[in-house]
Amino acid sequence: MPNQALRHSQLIDFEHAAAGHDGLRSDKMGSMLVKPCKQAEIDFYDTITSHPGFQTYVPTYYGTLALNPSPSQPTSSTHAPSHVPIQQKPDIPIVKKLVKASSVHSRSNSQNGNISNPTVAADNWIPSGGAAIVAENNIVLENVADGFGHPNILDVKLGRRLWADDAPPAKRQKLDKQTEETTSGTLAFRIAGMKTWLGKVAKPDSEDVNGYRKYDPSYGRALTVETVRQGFEAYFFTNSAGVTSELARKVVLRFLDDLRGLQEVLQNEESRMYSASLLFVYEGDGDSLKQKLEAATLPVSAEKSQSTTTLRNHNDETDATGTKEADTEESDGTSDESDEDLPKVQALKMIDFAHARWTPGQGPDENILSGIRNVIKVLEELVS
């Protein structure tokens, strides 16, 4: 990633968060997210480059920022290149350089991408209630919703067991109770939150904001094995926004491909990722979604042909005097376009790794995989 300069005035609250803690921010362009986190999550992100298959299903990790350094903290970092302490002044750049994860050396007792076993924390835990995490460090991640005109966002919390080995007894008890009372216990997943675009012509309820309907965590907790399908239907079938059954079906099929790919990757990894989530994002405007699906299904040769034809037609246009405009540059028949340049239809990523680690010798994470398999079953029912 190129050097990036950000200032405090350039960070804004992220408006598309569907679940999770408060405090998530983005740059004004919307390409990056700045998320407060604990050191354990940074340590895990630092190791992901050692697992390239899994890295495909994780938002791009750019490095970390120290937005609120303690008075005793030095003004520069010598042992972790991506940690850049800053001065909290509006006109002082808060990032001089974002260092890619591949160049970061973890501060954990890790070796070959493995993070050491945690110890049980003291039982002085107090529930956060979704409040922002109090932490000096922030991870800087790709904004998965960037590139979508009106992103529909779904956060699915994975696993029957939601607490890590170092969780104090009070936290274990609280999370176990949540599991027993929700689909986390029966299906190893629950809808943690979602946000859907209603469309410009919709008549939103008083709870809807800026054309979006947001479903908070209480919505997913109320769903049962019998009704959880309704939650996914509310996410995928948004007729008021022009997302027809046919368009929704195409999107679900694409997500199924992504989920099966992720499942295969995790079946070949040895890890434990407690309270991690699946993040679903797709284009929520029906007209735009239809155009993107059509463009995404074009063969690469057809796309290049269309692009070349458009360029040729443009260059052959005559000006007001009847003289052909001269080409400003010659084409050698090659294209610099990549998959990243294609219209974004949907994206699936895993997020929330505050309680994640690699566990060599312990086998795949069946706690997570059980949830993914059941999400696949529900989506298969939607398109059957």
Image (tube, rainbow, N blue to C red):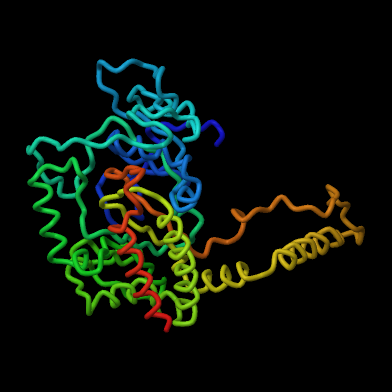
- Where is the C terminus found, in terms of image quarters? bottom left
Q: Which picture quadrant has residue 82?
A: top left
Q: Quadrant of the N terminus?
A: top right
23 shown above or below 178? above
Toward the front, the furthest residue is: 361
x, y percent for residue 64: 39, 33
Q: Position of residue 301 (x, y in %)?
A: 75, 65
Examine the image and state in which quarter residue 175 appears: bottom left
- 336 or 45: nearer the eye? 45
Side of 176 relative to 193 (left or right): left
Total numbered badges shown on the rendered structure: 0
Q: Is residue 30 visible?
A: no
Name the foreground residue: 224 vs 283: 224
Instruction: Answer whether residue 229 is visible to the viewer in this image.
Output: yes
Judge by depth and name the residue closer to the eye, 119 or 70.
119
Q: Where 256 sits versus 34, above or below?
A: below
Q: Residue furthest bottom?
A: 384
82 with respect to 352 (left or right): right
Indicate whether 326 appears above or below 73: below
Rendering coords of residue 54 (x, y %): 45, 50
The residue that appears at 35% across and 22% down in the rendered structure is 87
